[in-house]
Amino acid sequence: MSNLNLGPVIIEAAVSPFRFGEPAHLTEETIAEADACVAAGAGIIHHHHDMRLDEAAAIAQLVAIGRGIQDRHPGTLVYTDYLAGKRAVEENAHLAPMADAGVLTMFALDPGITTFGILNPKTGRPTHTYTDGLTFAEIDEMVEYAKAVDRPVSLGVFEPGHLRWIVAYARTVGFSKGSMIKLYFGGTHAVDKPQAKAINFGLPGTPAALDVYLGMIGDCGLPWTVSLFGDPVLQSPLARYAMEKGGHLRVGVEDAAIDTGMGNAEMVAAAVRLAGEVGRPVVKGPAALEVLRGVAA
């Protein structure tokens, strides 16, 4: 059964393990993971850098990874993590050098403050917290930078209030072409601590929760994707439901904090098969950006 009226699906692969105590992907490993995922059908690659590096070395690594991916797969949408820092200018110091090097194709922005919760391993109480994020004023500056360099942004939504801001911004001044909403749902595990239970953030990864977000998005016109933090999205009803509602899907070892027996490329391949079951074609490369910009594929 075809669902071409829903449009093509873009599969994002979050390829970097983000676990305390586990080795980071180095440059060539990250490029190899991205290469395998694009070959399997991924249209967006998200990766992290080696957080042990200082700012200059981190930027050099991100440029090298970007160049390595673009040399193999020109036009593929790739976005990175943030650099160390608590201000937008610090976290995004890599963007201008990547743009100058011709390897900036997309970047992430997470508007608003999020509290991440971890269950105390001794008591089971939700007493461990970590707060992160940027103010709306700081994000406003970065959105205008995206327009200046004509690059799309991936707008992370961890809490419903973040989505309120995004929709209001879209309806007033608008985002750079190709920008998309990334709906993060909180799973049962922490993404940075293997096998650790967490209360996480925001809404749970259920069809009913997605319906809440879709009601908030309304007719603002931005494409959207779903991600399940801490649990394998492909083992939840959220993945199929999102595709059936016209959304896109993020998979990868970063988000699936528990062992699924699958690597990044295998998860992408499984997502591609799911899209086929739903009746939607998968796009990648320059075609993925055209889809995000509303150009018929």
Image: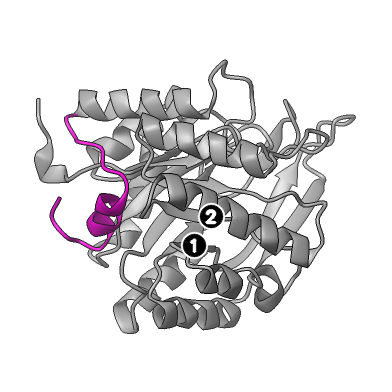
- Image disc number at residue 66: 2
On the question of residue 135 being in view, the answer is yes
- Render colour scheme: one colour
Residue drawn at x 49%, y 48% is 69
The N terminus lies in quadrant: top left
- Amino acid on which the number 2 mark rests in the picture: Gly
Name the dominant secondary structure of the magenta segment: loop
Looking at this view, name the residue that lies furthest to the top.
261
Q: Residue at x 74, y 29 (%)?
A: 194
Whether residue 237 is visible, yes or no, is no
Q: Quarter-wise, where is residue 195 in the image?
A: top right
Mark 1 or mark 2: name the one nearer the start of the chain.
2
Regarding mark 1 in the picture, which secondary structure is present there? loop
Instruction: Indicate left or right for 236 with 281 as reference.
Output: right
The residue positioned farthest toward the right in the image shown: 122
* Residue 227 badge: none
Whether tag 1 and tag 2 are in contact, CB under 8 A, the answer is: yes
- Give the residue at x 40% y 79%: 147
Magenta stretch bounds:
279-297
Dot label at residue 103: 1
Q: Nearer the viewer, residue 215 or 166?
A: 166
